[in-house]
């Protein structure tokens, strides 16, 4: 029995270590490549550690494309969308969870039904609408379709609000507080855990978004990071692996930071809701 | 209700109720604008657009069912659909196996679960475009680290992305790599929900771990497995970023998948009507998968895994 237990422990740890190695290797290789001098990049067998270490690739990256600008574009757009979704989706959630109005259930079902529509189905008409507004190649093109709330966030927050006992609002109601007061003073502070989940997932999603920014933006200075580095890779700098890896490192880095700060929310959020990617 | 009754009867709804309606309208307005303008109108507009020819320069021309008829005759469409199906058929069993192994290993009460979970999850939160670039470099036929490792153990290198019969598999491996941690979290939650008593009873009866896995774990985990499978199918059917960055649909058309072909029609060839028809065909396929899942799980789609 104990021999069997040892064997199973070895198998389990072997599996996990192999998995961890496989999961981390590409990240390791990305960082290593970004720190190499060009001559060391094309050696066989490859060198596992850069010698000498150089930040040349990062300098080249910032001179080849307006990388700093694209970084700020991505940060700005993502933060605005996250804040917008937090505010507007929790407002919608409040209406569905706390207010009585005609056709409430039907409207809620309609919200849920929109979750089944794949983004690619709305891609072309949305492009045409944004073009009609004259927003192609502007921040509005990137922000507007997402910042007024998402059906999924509204749904998630509504479910969370339904678990809050209504007695908590009774006292405020007797004092004559209106819905804005109840919403901002009582409900929002109580749904903070759900807001954290929405914020983290929206941040990851929109930081990584690619297809929409690819069609909605066409100038270098308006691009977001994903489109910026993909364009660079498709240009004749596509073989400068140091630059491409430097761009990848800086694109992934903010996500890694967010991930480690919010790891618990992410894992619990997925396990409890099956959050879509 | 006649006019006379209306004037006599007290208002059917109180002032407070009407105030609630108004509040609900205000609170829902941003969401309604968003869903109306960027989901409902596009869904309807896309449907009408799919019956037109439109290059975005001249006015759209109504062509009836022509786009759909053309799709059925379009060899590129069938090629893209086949590539997408093959891609999905690689990703699903591969991804399920990897994530199941990781979930089982993490479920066996060992130290460092949180650290492993964080490591496995890292690829999922990382930008797909950046990840795709890194893997393209790893797959490099001459200087890639993967072929270097193969050669180190005496194996020949592989043309991971330049051999038409390998490229689709290579991209699928990246998707498996990226989503394994996410699927693992779902499966682990499912595993932890299985009551311990079942295992105890089976162990007392002398069942082997293998038997326990197939006769207890898998049947009880079936809803989660099914959910993971469905969302993986839906994601695989819409793969775009990996293909765009790693292969651009090549070599030949060997990795030209559905959404890539759609994007190409819309934004390279400016055949907006045809691309809209392609989008609707995909919509129907994905809707069918979603509805099968909903029926199987008896839950509203998109909420499962609880």
Image: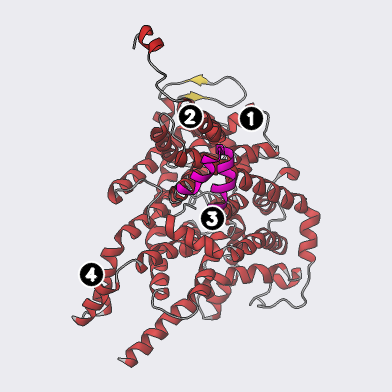
User: On what subunit does the disc labeled 1 rest?
Assistant: A
Other residues around mark 4 within 10 Å, as few (<14) / some (14–19) / many (≥20): few
Q: Is residue A176 magenta?
A: yes
- The colouring scheme, among rainbow, by chain, secondary structure or one colour, is secondary structure
Q: Secondary structure at mark 1?
A: helix
Between disc 1 and disc 4, the foreground one is 4
Q: Position of residue B24 (x, y in %)?
A: 50, 33
**Who is closer to the viewer here, A206 or B267?**
A206
Front-most of B109 and B284?
B109
Question: What predominant SS class does the magenta segment belong to?
Answer: helix
Mark seen at residue A131: 1
Bounds of the magenta span? A167-196
The answer to whether residue B74 of the structure is visible from this angle is no
Identify the mark at residue B215; answer none if there is no mark: 4
Q: Secondary structure at mark 3?
A: helix
Vertical relation: B300 (above or below) A6? above
């Amino acid at each position: 029995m104990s021999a069997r237990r040892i064997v199973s422990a070895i198998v389990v740890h072997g599996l996990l270590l192999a998995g961890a190695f496989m999961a981390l290797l590409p990240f390791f290789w990305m960082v290593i490549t970004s720190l190499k001098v060009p001559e060391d990049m094309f050696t066989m067998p490859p060198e596992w550690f850069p010698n000498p270490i150089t930040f040349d690739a990062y300098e080249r990256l910032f001179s080849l494309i307006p990388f700093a600008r694209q970084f700020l574009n991505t940060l700005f757009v993502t933060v605005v969308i996250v804040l917008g979704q937090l505010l507007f989706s929790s407002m919608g959630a409040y209406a569905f969870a706390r207010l009585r109005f005609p056709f409430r259930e039907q409207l809620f079902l309609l919200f849920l039904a929109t979750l089944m529509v794949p983004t690619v189905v709305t891609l072309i008409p949305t492009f045409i609408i944004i073009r009609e507004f004259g927003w192609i190649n502007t921040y509005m093109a990137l922000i507007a379709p997402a910042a007024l709330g998402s059906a999924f966030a509204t749904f998630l927050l509504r479910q969370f609000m339904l678990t809050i006992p209504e007695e908590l609002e009774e006292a405020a109601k007797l004092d004559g507080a209106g819905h804005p007061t109840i919403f901002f003073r009582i409900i929002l502070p109580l749904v903070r855990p759900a807001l954290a989940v929405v914020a983290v997932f929206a941040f990851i999603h929109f930081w990584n978004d690619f297809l929409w920014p690819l069609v909605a933006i066409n100038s270098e200075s308006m691009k977001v990071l994903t489109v910026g580095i993909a364009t660079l890779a498709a240009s004749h700098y596509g073989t400068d692996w140091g630059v491409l890896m430097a761009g990848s490192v800086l694109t992934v880095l903010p996500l890694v930071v967010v991930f480690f700060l919010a790891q618990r929310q992410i894992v619990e959020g997925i396990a409890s809701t099956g959050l879509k990617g | 209700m006649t006019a006379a009754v209306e004037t006599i009867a007290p208002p059917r709804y109180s002032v407070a109720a009407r105030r609630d309606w108004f509040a609900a309208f205000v609170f829902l307005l941003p969401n309604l604008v968003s869903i109306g303008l960027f989901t409902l109108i596009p869904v309807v507009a896309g449907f009408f657009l799919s019956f037109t020819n439109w290059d975005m320069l001249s006015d759209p021309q109504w062509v009836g069912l022509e786009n759909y008829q053309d799709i059925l005759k379009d060899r590129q469409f069938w090629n893209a659909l086949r590539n997408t199906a093959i891609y999905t058929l690689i990703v699903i069993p591969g991804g399920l196996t990897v994530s199941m192994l990781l979930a089982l290993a993490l479920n066996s009460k060992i130290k460092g679960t949180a650290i492993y979970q964080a490591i496995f999850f890292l690829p999922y939160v990382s930008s797909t475009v950046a990840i795709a670039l890194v893997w393209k470099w790893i797959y490099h036929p001459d200087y890639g680290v993967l072929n270097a490792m193969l050669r180190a153990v005496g194996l020949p290198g592989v043309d991971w992305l330049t051999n038409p019969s390998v490229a689709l598999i290579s991209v699928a491996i990246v998707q498996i790599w990226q989503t394994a941690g996410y699927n693992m979290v779902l499966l682990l939650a499912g595993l932890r929900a299985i009551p311990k008593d079942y295992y105890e009873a089976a162990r007392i009866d002398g069942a082997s771990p293998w038997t326990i896995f197939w006769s207890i774990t898998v049947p009880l985990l079936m809803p989660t497995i099914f959910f993971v499978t469905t969302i993986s199918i839906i994601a695989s059917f819409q793969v775009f970023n990996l293909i765009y960055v790693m292969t651009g649909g090549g070599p030949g058309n060997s990795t030209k998948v559905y959404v890539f072909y759609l994007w190409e029609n819309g934004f390279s060839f400016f055949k907006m009507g045809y691309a809209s028809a392609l989008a609707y065909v995909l919509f129907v396929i994905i809707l069918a998968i979603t509805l099968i899942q909903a029926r199987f799980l008896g839950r509203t789609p998109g909420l499962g895994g609880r």
